[in-house]
Amino acid sequence: MRNMQNMRNIGAIMTVAGLFALPVSAQAQGVTGGAARGAVQGGEAAGPLGAAAGGVVGGVTGGVAGLLGIDQRPRFREYVMREHIPAYRIHEPVTVGMVLPSPSVTLYAIPREFGVSPDYRYAVVNEKVVLVEPTSREIVDVID
């Protein structure tokens, strides 16, 4: 019985390791946020192995698909630049997972044409276009 459990654990670890080895040609900063969200959700559902698998799957789907498809990212950035919205400066580097200061950074609706859930907003911070979850004000993607 114990041997069988060890074999399952080894199999799960090898599966997760194999997922890490998958080539991901389109690296985006959404990988970090997707991995973090996937790890938390996997951990809640299935403990440590679930967290590892969820982190990998979340990283792959969050980075490759992201909120904006790879082909949409340059077009969305161009759209935001044409809008001439005020850019905000903060003293730290802009990264996925950071929380924006509540009142000082205005968040804008993302037009439907980009296919992003209406639950997200965008802003320009330190000259970078960021996608934000408005309730928590957490940056979920940085569009370069």
Image (cartoon, rainbow, N blue to C red):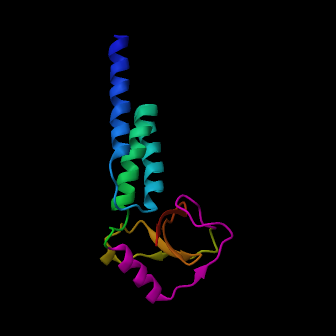
> Do we see residue 94 in this rendering?
yes
| In front of the other: 11 or 96 | 11
Q: Nearer the viewer, residue 132 or 28?
A: 28
Q: Position of residue 140 (x, y in %)?
A: 48, 62
Residue pictured at 38% horizontal, 69% vertical: 118
Rendering coords of residue 26 (x, y %): 36, 62
Q: Quadrant of residue 67?
A: bottom left
Classify residue 15 by image quadrant: top left
Residue 118 lies in the magenta-colored region = no
- Please provide percent x and percent y for residue 50: 40, 36
Q: Residue at x 46, y 73 (%)?
A: 144
Q: Residue most toward the top? A: 1
Q: Which residues are magenta?
A: 72-101
Residue in the picture at 43% in, 38% down: 52
Q: Nearer the viewer, residue 68 or 41?
A: 68
Task: In the rendered view, tell whether residue 133 sits above or below residue 79.
Answer: above
Image point (62%, 68%), residue name:
102
**Residue 107 seen by the camera:** no
Image position of 102 (left or right of 20): right
